[in-house]
Amino acid sequence: MIKQKNNTLIIVFTRNPELGKVKTRLAKGIGNKNALEVYKILLKHTDTVLRKTNIDKLISYSVKINKDDIWDNTMYMKEAQKGTHLGERMQNAFTNAFKHNYEKVIVIGSDLYDLNAMHIEKAIEALNSNDLVMGPAKDGGYYLLGMKTLHQTIFKNKNWGTNTVFQETLKDLEDIEDLKIEFLETLNDIDFAEDLETYPIFKPYL
């Protein structure tokens, strides 16, 4: 349910934190229980970052809305994702946001311990003079996507979850005349056990 207060909306794509159903690639290296604990830390970090931003916030759950979790119901709007794959789910999220007359819409993931409020602020500012803003991830995907109008080509014919998504997206956008894109710094997704090694907070789970 969207109740607009601001002209900018940030949507957090998140999985419901259930044992054996989150960070499955990470779980292969550290086990399901540790993977769930790591994911909970990542969710809490994302919450901490977003609390520093003065924009509308929406949590988009992979399975079902959870009214009793870390996401404060007075601060976050909540909805369940709709679609059969990530591209379709993101497209539906953007479409719904623009239907509610948001001028800037930004989607982020929930597995980035390097994310901070500065990245969000830079993305919002970038949309003042650009059509799109993207935050590339080291694994070949992207951790942030923002736009002012819907560009459906981004969500079509992608091998989601692979290391080609970012480059495939740029290739598809080449055909849009005069499209202006700004890129944020590249950040590290937490997907595999080795991704945890440089963060002291995750050492107990290795």
Image (spheres, helix red, strand yellow):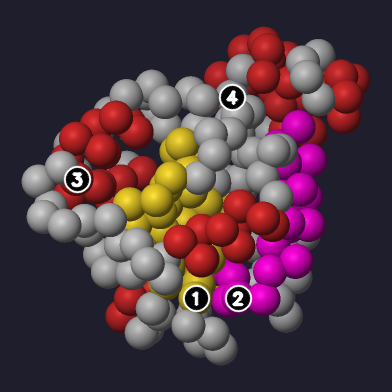
Cα–Cα span, label 3 and label 4: 27 Å
Asked if the residue under mark 4 is in contact with the one under mark 3, i.e. CB atoms within 8 Å, the reply is no
Q: Amino acid at mark 3?
A: Leu
Does the magenta portion include 51? yes
Asked if the residue under mark 1 is in contact with the one under mark 2, i.e. CB atoms within 8 Å, the reply is yes
Q: Earlier in the sequence, mark 2 or mark 1?
A: 1
Q: Crowding near pointer 2: few (<14 within 10 Å), some, many (20+)?
A: some
Q: Crowding near pointer 4: few (<14 within 10 Å), some, many (20+)?
A: some
Q: Crowding near pointer 3: few (<14 within 10 Å), some, many (20+)?
A: some
With respect to residue 159, does 9 lie above or below?
Answer: below
Residue at point 87%, 19% (across, down): 203
Does the magenta portion include 143? no
Query: According to the image, label 2 marks what residue?
Result: 55
Cα–Cα span, label 1 and label 4: 29 Å
Residue 70: % across, % down: 77, 59
Q: Earlier in the sequence, mark 1 or mark 4?
A: 1
Cα–Cα span, label 3 and label 2: 27 Å
Query: According to the image, label 4 marks what residue?
Result: 191
